[in-house]
Image (cartoon, grey):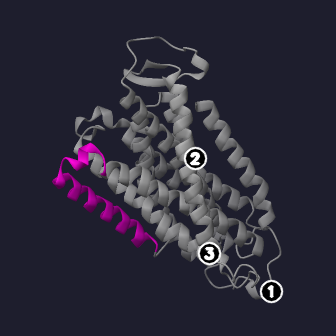
Amino acid sequence: MASSLVKLFSIFFIIISIFTPQALSVVPEECQTQIDGCINKEKALPLKIIAIFSILVSSIIGVCSPLFTRSIPALGPDRNLFVIVKCFAAGIILATGFMHVLPDSFDMLSSRCLKENPWHKFPFTGFVAMLSAIVTLMVDSMATSIYTKKNNNGVIPETAGGQHEMAVVNIGEFHGHHHGPKPAGGVDQQLLRYRVIAMVLELGIVVHSVVIGLSLGASNNTCTIKGLVAALCFHQMFEGMGLGGCILQAEYKAAKKFTMAFFFSVTTPFGIALGMALSKTYKDNSPTALITVGLLNASSAGLLIYMALVDLLSSDFMGPKLQASIKLQIKSYCAVLLGAGGMSLMAKWA
């Protein structure tokens, strides 16, 4: 699965690299960026370099911190504190979709720089976000079915770093060492769900991260970059915690954990670097750029909202652990509201 994950993200980066130059279209005269005292390319460059390293470090801390919680008994996946922290991170992901990505898409696809017909005649943002949520449901459901069928061909517990991991075996072939009887079907199914959730969530976050990095890298407005860097560090750290918790529950081997953590950590810095390389020609208010980024944001919003509500929050709150304790439910709801509220507040700057 690690090789297929690398191929998937490699294809995504290639597509971004191909379609981004199409956003270098001529900006209509009435949509030209107004020159003010905040536009300074020379002063913006060091801020962008600082942004690359600070966001990279924040992303690494965020996505890796849950992966080391097994050494801390109080933060184990089976403990109440882990559930509360995961709900906090899910609230951040939910607010990212509703308060950051979706409004940005609405603004872009309703811009006066776009033609009246069809962009001002039809709510493309809501339509694309809806389609994205439906497609995410399809991928979620079909991937689970496919992995379950493969799982029926053979499941072998493997030992990696002192932890047992279930290996989904293709075409009935056994790879690795057999250490015991086949695990119970219910446990297998739940582990497969965790793996599908982790991969789909990673894909949605990667799309969003590249887009926001591209916008930051192409901007030369020093007044907005300063606040944006701080907001993105907070955003990436806690969004990474949510993803890291999903990766931990998926019980991947070390190589797969590293691959997923690596792609999450580098996508926003990659987007910033790409935006810096194209800053001379990339115009964020050109029609092609507005349409491309607006549609990407809408699709990312639909995916993030679906994942936060269905695969993260609903699955936890309807699960046996939270259903058995009203007190834990109340604490988890407070964590969700705190995470969503904090990320909503960040919308003032980012």
Say which label, 1 or 3, has the lower sequence index: 1
Q: Which residue is mark 2?
A: 139
Range of magenta residues: 318-347
Dot 2: element = helix
What residue is drawn where x is 31% and y is 38%?
Answer: 77
Front residue (pair 272, 139)? 139
Per the rendering, the mark at residue 29 is 1
| Residue 69 drawn above or below residue 205 | above
Q: Nearer the viewer, residue 295 or 217?
A: 295
Within 10 Å of disc 1 (Cα), the crowding (few <14, some 14-19, many 20+) is few
> How many numbered badges does the structure rendering display?
3
Q: CA distance from mark 1 to mark 3?
A: 20 Å
Q: Which residue is mark 3?
A: 221
Q: Is residue 209 visible?
A: no
Whether residue 345 appears in magenta in the rendering, the answer is yes
For the residues carrying marks 1 and 2, which lies nearer the camera in this image? 2
Q: Mark 3: give few (<14), some (14-19) or many (20+) Cα within 10 Å.
A: some
Residue type at mark 1: give it.
Glu
Specify which label sits upstream in the sequence, 1 or 2.
1
Dot 2: within a 10 Å radius of its alpha carbon, few (fewer than 14), some, or many (20 or more) residues? Answer: some
Q: Earlier in the sequence, mark 2 or mark 3?
A: 2
160 magenta-colored: no
Where's residue 85, x and y in %?
A: 31, 51
- Residue occupying image coordinates x 54% and y 29%: 149
- The secondary structure making up most of the magenta span is helix
Q: Name the amino acid, label 3.
A: Asn
Question: x, y (%) of residue 161?
Answer: 41, 22
Helix, strand or loop at mark 1: helix
Q: CA distance from mark 1 to mark 2?
A: 42 Å
Mark 2: amino acid: Val
